[in-house]
Image (cartoon, grey):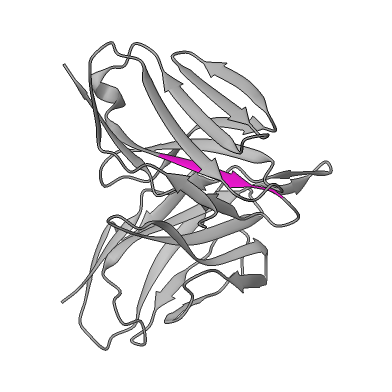
Amino acid sequence: QKEVEQDPGPLSVPEGAIVSLNCTYSNSAFQYFMWYRQYSRKGPELLMYTYSSGNKEDGRFTAQVDKSSKYISLFIRDSQPSDSATYLCATGGGSNYKLTFGKGTLLTVNP
Amino acid sequence: DGGITQSPKYLFRKEGQNVTLSCEQNLNHDAMYWYRQDPGQGLRLIYYSQIVNDFQKGDIAEGYSVSREKKESFPLTVTSAQKNPTAFYLCASSMGLAGGRIYNEQFFGPGTRLTVL
């Protein structure tokens, strides 16, 4: 079983839709959870950071972590064409600094 | 302006040549990382360094080498031993250990696209 599984999509939605992106992970030692956004041919940009279980909201973005089911989610409200990108989940924990990334979900928001 | 810079943006290499990719950060971060990104493969860790003068192999270190002589710099050399070097290379950094907590949020540079001719 891979450490982090992420549906690669592609996911296509109309402008204004609510988008749900998800990942599952297998290592119960993971405590830190992140979402990155990557535009084509650019470096990933950190969107959301969460420690342990719970929700975190930042504008139109909400990150959710359920450690009991090892499930992490990113919700985008009122999606915009500028949200069209690849979204990567990442997790980490323990004494080293490494992160384990999902393979990314390609999202297209159509005007 | 704080951040991570990578150069060059595009790099072309002939087979059998070694090339060095530059990565510099002015964020005062202790830890630095090199990833390779191929279509459909996600990010794969090549090497990482948690502190100056120390580095560890990642998941796909064969055919690559690094050095960490200065805190702000972490160059990656792609050697002729790397069988399929054409890829998008990303450098990242994180703060590391501070105040008893590990700050492992990674911040990425813009990437270098390497093509072997």
Q: Residue furthest right?
A: B100
Tell me where the magenta segment starts and ends, as one range. Answer: A88-93
Please say whether residue B70 is visible from this viewpoint: yes
**Residue A94 located left or right of residue A84:** right
Near-viewer residue (B3 or B76): B76
Please say whether residue B2 is visible from this viewpoint: no
Q: Quadrant of the C terminus of chain B?
A: bottom left
**Splitting the image into 4 quarters, where does residue A55 fall?**
top right
Q: Is residue A91 magenta?
A: yes
Q: Position of residue A5 (x, y in %)?
A: 46, 47
The structure residue drawn at horizontal position 70% and vertical position 57%, both measured from the top left corner, is A96
Q: Give the number of callouts.
A: 0
Seen in the picture, residue B117 relative to A86 is either above or below; the reply is below
Q: Is residue A12 magenta?
A: no
Near-viewer residue (B16 or A6): A6
Q: Position of residue B96 (x, y in %)?
A: 69, 50
**Residue B88 located left or right of residue B66:** left
Q: Position of residue A3 (x, y in %)?
A: 55, 54
**Splitting the image into 4 quarters, where does residue B76 fall?**
bottom left
Mostly what secondary structure, the magenta segment? Answer: strand
The structure residue drawn at horizontal position 66% and vertical position 35%, both measured from the top left corner, is A67
Near-viewer residue (B6 or A7): A7
